Amino acid sequence: MMDDDALIAAARAAAEGSYSPYSKFRVGAVAVGSGGEIFTGANVENAAYPASSCAEATAINTAVSHGVRKIDTVAVACVDAEGAEGAYPCGRCRQIMAEFGVERVLVSAGEDSEVREHTLDELLPHRFTL
Ligand SMILES: [Zn+2]
């Protein structure tokens, strides 16, 4: 089992795979399945901006594509956000997290940033569910 610092390090490494020629904002994410499985993802942009995919969505959708249906933790890191507040998940990604039961979200922006831990309840209260 990877600890939180190792998960953020893996997210930062995953950002190296980012395709972000438009925003220049490289983001990586790690999704940890309930069985401890690890899946990574990076943001993949498109000239038609809405066709882009966030790192968190890439990681979660990869996990789900491999049969995972419950994700415990998502870690996200941005390698270009000098001085930024951190690469917090967008609203769409928070809803994707809700679908697969994410409980913990770890966020870090850069090499010296502290790892911030949030619950999904904090990030997306009153979310839509069926
Ligand atoms: Zn997003």
Image: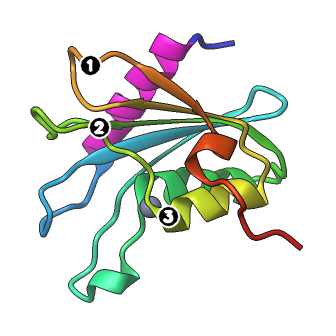
Q: What label does residue 113 carry, if any? A: 1
Residue 38 place in picture, x, y as percent: 64, 33
Which residue is found at the position 43% from the left and 53% from the top? 55
Q: Taking 26 as reference, is 29 left or right?
A: right
Rate crowding at label 3 as few (under 14), some (14 to 19) or many (20 or more) other CA atoms within 10 Å: few
- Asked whether 93 or 14 is in front, the reply is 93
User: Is the residue marked 3 within 8 Å of ligand 1, measured from its CB?
Assistant: yes
Cβ atoms under marks 1 and 2 closer than 8 Å: yes
Please tell me which of labels 1 and 2 falls first in the chain.
2
Q: Secondary structure at mark 2?
A: loop
What distance separates the C-alpha of mark 2 from that of mark 3?
15 Å
Residue 87: quarter of image: top left
Where disc 1 sits, the SS reads loop
Q: Specify whether 112 is left or right of 8.
A: left
Q: CA distance from mark 3 to mark 1?
A: 22 Å
The amino acid at mark 1 is Ser
Q: Which residue is mark 2?
A: 86
Q: Which mark is residue 91?
A: 3
Q: Main secondary structure of the magenta part?
A: helix
Residue 100: in sight, yes or no? yes
On the picture, is 34 further left or further right than 1? right
Q: Earlier in the sequence, mark 3 or mark 1?
A: 3
Residue at the spot 21% in from the left edge and 14% down from the top edge? 112
Residue at the extreme front: 126
Viewer-side residue, 118 vs 26: 118
Q: Position of residue 42 (x, y in %)?
A: 39, 51
Which quadrant would residue 72 be assigned to in this image?
top right
The amino acid on which the numbered mark 3 sits, given as a three-letter code, is: Gly
How many residues crowd mark 2 within 10 Å: few (<14), some (14–19), many (20+)?
many
Task: State the residue at coordinates (64%, 62%).
Answer: 96
